Amino acid sequence: MKFLSKLNIFRLSHVEFTRTGQPKILGRYAVHFHMIGNAHDSYVNGIAVHHSFARVTTIHATHYLRFTNNVGYAAVGHNVFLEDGIERHNHIEGNLIMSAREASFML
C-alpha cells in the first residue's frame, strides 16, 4: 500500500480485509476515499473485503479513481458507495459483490 497525500496518490492491490468497518461511526469503512479530489494515478485493484461491518468502499468527492477487479463478500450496506453523487470519471469495473447484508444501522 502506498499513500502520498501531497500528490493525492493511493495504490492498493492484492490484499485482504476481513471484519473491518464500524457501522455506527461515520466514515469507518474498509476502504474510504474522503475528499481526495483528482486521483488520476490512484487505484484499488484485486482486493478482497469480506465480513465487513460497514461497506467495501466509499468514494467521496474523489475523481478519476480506478476501482477494478475487487471482491466483496458478506459486507453490510451499499458495498460500493458513491457518497455525494458529485464524484466524476471514476472507473468502477470487473468487481464481484456477493451476499450483501442489510444495513438498518449504518451512518
Image (cartoon, rainbow, N blue to C red):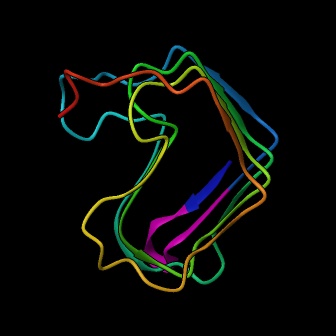
Residue 106 drawn above or below residue 81: above
- Can residue 7 be found in the magenta stretch? yes
Q: In this view, does 61 lie to the left or right of 97?
A: left
Where does the image place residue 58, in percent across and percent down from the top left? 41, 51
Residue 44 drawn above or below residue 106: below
Where does the image place residue 53, in percent across and percent down from the top left? 41, 19
Residue segment shown in magenta: 4-11
Q: In this view, does 99 lie to the left or right of 33?
A: right
- In which image quadrant can residue 102 be found? top left
Residue 55 drawn above or below residue 66: above
- Can residue 102 be found in the magenta stretch? no
Where does the image place residue 15, in percent across and percent down from the top left? 76, 34
Residue 96 drawn above or below residue 34: above
How many marks do you count on the picture?
0
- Going 56% across and 15% down the picture, which residue do you hit? 51
81 vs 3, nearest the viewer: 81
- Going 30% across and 73% down the picture, which residue do you hit? 85
2 vs 42, nearest the viewer: 42
Q: In this view, does 58 lie to the left or right of 9?
A: left
Q: Is residue 30 left or right of residue 54?
A: right
Quadrant the C terminus occupies:
top left
- Going 55% across and 77% down the picture, which residue do you hit? 90
- Going 19% across and 21% down the picture, which residue do you hit? 105
